[in-house]
Each structure stands twice: as C-alpha cells, then as structure tokens.
Image (tube, helix red, strand yellow):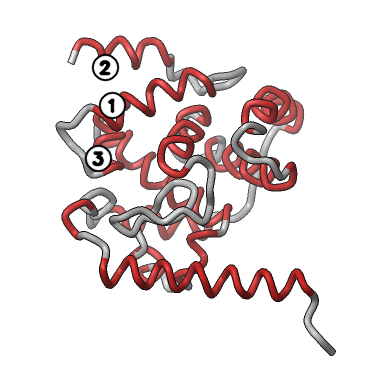
Amino acid sequence: MRPSASCVRESAARAAAALFIGLALAFGPRAEARGQRDPALRPIVQHAIRRAQCFMNRYDAAVWYTLMEPRMARFVRNPAERLKILKQVYCVTHQPGVAKVPPGLVLAVMQVESDFNRWAVSGSGAVGLMQVMPYWPERLGMKGYELVHVAANIRMGCAILRYYLSITHDDVRLALEEYNGSVGRHFYPDRVLSAWENWSGADDLGFPVRAARAVAARR
C-alpha cells in the first residue's frame, strides 16, 4: 500500500527540519546563542513538556479566539494552523499552578522571532515559532524535529519566557533581553513591546502594555 501524499509531505517536512536543525547545531554561530542557557531552565522546560493537558474556560477562550484570529490571519493563512497556535498559546498561558504569562506577549514574541513560521531557523540555530534553541530536544530526550511542532515549541518557549519573567520580577524588557540573549541591547525588546500593543486583548493577565512601554522609555 502506497503512503498518502500527506504522509509523504509530512515525512519530507520532518526530514528537512531535522537537517536544518542539525546544520544549525554544527555550524551556527555560538556567540549569538547565549540566551536560554541558564542551567536552572532544564527542569522547568522538562516539566512544561510533560504538562500536556489543557484546562480552560471555554467561554473566555472563545472570546479570546474571536479577538485574536482575525489579527493572526495576516500572518498565517491556514485557518487550522491559526487555531492550533491560538489554542496552544491560550492553554499554556492559563495553566493553573504556575506563574501566568501574558498571551499577547507570547504572540508578540512569535511575531518578532519567526513571523509565525514554525519552520523558521535563525543564524544562531534557534528553531520554530518561539525560536527555541536546538539543544533543548536532546536535553529532554526528544527528537530535533519536534521543535517545529506547534505545541512542543510553544510549551518550551513559554516555560523559558516565564522563567525569565520570574527571575527579573516581571521586568518585561529585561526578561525579553534574557530570552533573546541580548542583555543590554534595546532593539529586540523594543520590537516585541511594540508588537505587543497589537496583540493585547480581553485577557492579558494583568500585565499593562502601556506601563511596560513607559518603563522601556525611561531606560
């Protein structure tokens, strides 16, 4: 029995992603990869990957989807892909028992990092929607190509961002600098904070966007 065309495309996509990640690990410039290397991150990211269940208020989620889906349409043309990304972002940012992460901030990070392209690979080897560094799958016993999977990439990226928000006491600018490995440089956080204004909606978990921009302006 011959494999279906969709199976062939999926296998090819996985092989291509694995090749890109392997090349990035072997040849990518190490100087730009300082972000996401804190030793304390490993158990945090590992825990995030294991927490696959999602519990959410369906009404609140539906309101949020309705607000965000038209905005994402200009970046992601496939409706199923848009829904998959939005569902995972809402799920991970509303997990009980952990510090909340603003969903609008997560979307802003994705916009700046990958333009919502889950196949994106940076010059420093970062992969996927939230540009997670490619050493994470190996450390967590995963396959490299899993970084291009929507759910795994968002769970890892949000765990890393949550950690940096925690150690900086919710200093969004500094947390973004740590996430990107560009501490002391303002270009990256400026771009994310600007994009965040486009994604703030009915529920951004008490992180006022304009207050974050005001803090940025004073630095």
The percent position of residue 113, horizontal first and vertical second, equals 41, 41
Vertical side of 114 occupied by 193: above or below: above
Residue ID at (30%, 39%): 164
Q: Determine crowd level at label 2: few under 14, some 14-19, many 20+ residues with C-alpha closer than 10 A.
A: some
- Give the number of the disc on residue 178: 3
- Give the number of the disc on residue 173: 1
Question: What kind of element bears circle 1?
Answer: helix
| Left-right relation of 7 to 47 | right
Of labels 2 and 3, earlier in sequence is 3
Q: Determine crowd level at label 3: few under 14, some 14-19, many 20+ residues with C-alpha closer than 10 A.
A: many
Residue ID at (42%, 36%): 112
Q: Quadrant of residue 47?
A: bottom left
Q: State the CA–CA distance, disc 1 to disc 2.
A: 7 Å
| Left-right relation of 137 to 68 | left
Kindly identify the amino acid type of the residue bearing the numbered disc 3: Glu
Vertical side of 118 occupied by 188: above or below: above
Q: Quadrant of the C terminus?
A: top left
Q: In this view of the protein, which residue sits in the foreground, 62 or 182?
A: 182
Q: Are marks 1 and 2 in contact (CB under 8 Å)?
A: yes
The percent position of residue 187, horizontal first and vertical second, equals 26, 29
The percent position of residue 210, horizontal first and vertical second, equals 40, 10
Question: What kind of element bears circle 2?
Answer: helix
Q: In this view of the protein, which residue sits in the foreground, 170 or 114?
A: 114
